[in-house]
């Protein structure tokens, strides 16, 4: 697909697109610009002297055998050992074609194992095919899956060349009209131990799991004779696609809040020309709840999260222009990560939607959050101590099957 201009035609969406935006709670202004991947905070850590530091370089070297073990709980050798092992599959995919200048899953989409089959399976019923794809996606390991239309606004204007961190074209094949968006749930008990290297294993498991699922489902689609470009953090912004695909709503903590896992998910996607039916955005009261709740912003150590209402754009280079939303100060956020030598998801841990929704009482809490009783739910959430950090040693002492 030839690279589209940085600003979409006329700077205003078509009426169907505008209608879809309203349903998804997305507000795009006339100054919208597609995002350059080079400006995301993880790319900037390599080329932008205002972000790059000795701490940030140590952070990126942290998934090997080397670790910065400390005496504090959650940062011991075994905590780092677990985290690094959890990342190993995603890291293997990222490194397998590094000699060719690719970093699959992070700066570049996955390279296909085999091209599409010469014989194309006829698809007479896109709804039936969508149900089949969702079943296969879950067989291959994802927890949630939705389908949405290809939206060029969320595709990076350019990708990042890892050899010099300059811009390079973000070309996609023609005709990829559909996007399959998948989510992997993260371990509830590990997330309660944030911030720690131990808790970082929950993120690593998500990335390694999605690397496998994306590779397998993409190849299944190619085996049917259709194109499939498997993508993780690369190629396009997945959060608006996940919202459009009906997997959740956008929250103050910069995450998609799902009904099934709250914010405790990792997203990936596949671009394809396989005929599929699209899911509709789904609302269950997250926007209204986040408007009155500031637990993530209050708990953020570097105060990187916004306290006020959604605004157009953001004050830092890593914010997309022309979209009205809650926007973090990425420099503050990543700076804190780098100093810890591990990721921080305190905002995920304290979120009132971070619950074990297999339990009926937690499903009731979720329902209250979507009603006019949301302030009561928030008060109870704080009063009952939800979101408080659990000592990492607690996870190591848990028995298999403990809930």
Image (cartoon, grey):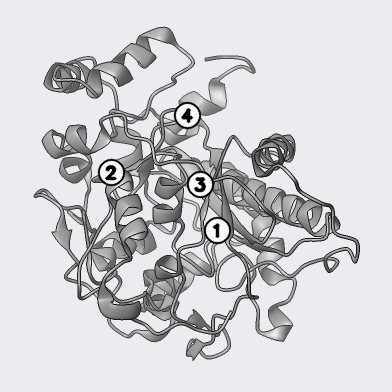
Label 3 vs label 1: CA separation?
24 Å
Residue 73 is situated, as x and y percent measured from the top left of the image, at 43, 38
Q: Is mark 1 on a helix, strand or loop?
A: loop
Which residue is label 4 attached to?
188
Which residue is label 1 attached to?
67
Q: Which of the two discs, 2 and 4, labels the residue nearer the N terminus?
A: 4
Q: What element carries label 3?
A: strand
Q: How crowded is mark 3: few (under 14 residues within 10 Å), some or many (20 or more)?
A: many
Q: Do the residues labelled 1 and 2 touch (CB within 8 Å)?
A: no
The extreme top residue here reads 360
Rendered position, 227 above or below 1: above
Closer to the eye: label 3 or 4: 3
Q: Is mark 2 on a helix, strand or loop?
A: loop
Q: Residues within 10 Å of mark 4 (few under 14, many from 20)?
A: some
Label 2 vs label 4: CA separation?
19 Å
Which residue is label 2 attached to?
251
Q: Are marks 3 and 1 in contact (CB under 8 Å)?
A: no
The extreme left residue here reads 308
Q: Which of the two discs, 3 and 1, labels the residue nearer the N terminus?
A: 1
Q: Which of the two discs, 1 and 2, labels the residue nearer the N terminus?
A: 1
Which residue is label 3 attached to?
266
- Residue 6 shows in the view: yes
Q: Which of the two discs, 3 and 4, labels the residue nearer the N terminus?
A: 4
Label 1 vs label 2: CA separation?
33 Å
Residue plotted at (83% across, 54% down): 224
Q: Are marks 4 and 1 in contact (CB under 8 Å)?
A: no
């Amino acid at each position: 697909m030839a690279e589209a201009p940085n600003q979409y035609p006329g700077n205003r969406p078509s009426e169907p697109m505008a209608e879809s935006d309203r349903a998804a709670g997305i507000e795009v202004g006339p100054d919208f610009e597609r995002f350059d991947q080079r400006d995301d905070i993880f790319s900037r850590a390599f080329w932008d002297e205002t972000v790059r530091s000795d701490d940030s370089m140590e952070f990126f070297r942290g998934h090997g055998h080397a670790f910065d073990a400390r005496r504090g709980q959650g940062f011991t050798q075994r905590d780092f050992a677990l985290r690094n092992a959890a990342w190993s599959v995603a890291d293997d995919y990222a490194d397998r074609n590094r000699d060719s200048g690719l970093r699959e899953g992070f700066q570049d989409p996955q390279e296909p194992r085999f091209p599409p089959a010469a014989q194309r399976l006829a698809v007479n019923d896109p709804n039936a095919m969508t149900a089949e794809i969702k079943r296969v996606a879950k067989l291959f390991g994802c927890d949630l899956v939705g389908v949405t239309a290809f939206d060029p606004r969320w595709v990076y204007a350019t990708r990042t060349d890892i050899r010099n961190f300059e811009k390079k074209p973000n070309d996609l094949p023609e005709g990829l009209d559909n996007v399959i968006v998948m989510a992997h749930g993260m371990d509830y008990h590990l997330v309660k131990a944030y911030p720690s290297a131990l808790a970082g294993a929950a993120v690593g498991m998500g990335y390694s799991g999605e690397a496998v699922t994306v590779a397998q489902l993409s190849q299944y689609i190619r085996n049917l004779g259709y194109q499939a470009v498997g993508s993780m953090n690369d190629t396009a912004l997945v959060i608006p696609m996940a919202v459009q695909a009906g997997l959740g709503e956008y929250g103050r903590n910069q995450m998609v809040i799902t009904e099934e896992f709250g914010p405790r998910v990792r997203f990936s996607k596949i671009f394809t020309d396989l005929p599929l039916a699209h899911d509709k955005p789904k609302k269950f009261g997250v926007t209204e709840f986040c408007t009155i709740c500031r637990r993530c912003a209050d708990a953020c150590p570097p105060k990187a999260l916004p306290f006020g209402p959604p605004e157009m754009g953001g004050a830092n280079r890593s914010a997309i222009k022309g979209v009205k939303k809650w926007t973090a100060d990425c420099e503050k956020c990543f700076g804190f990560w780098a100093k810890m030598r591990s990721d921080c998801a305190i905002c995920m841990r304290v979120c009132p939607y971070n619950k074990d929704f297999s339990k009926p009482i937690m499903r009731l809490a979720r329902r209250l959050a979507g009603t006019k009783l949301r302030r009561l739910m928030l008060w109870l959430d704080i009063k009952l101590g939800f979101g408080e950090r659990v000592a990492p040693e607690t996870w190591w002492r848990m028995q298999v099957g403990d809930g």
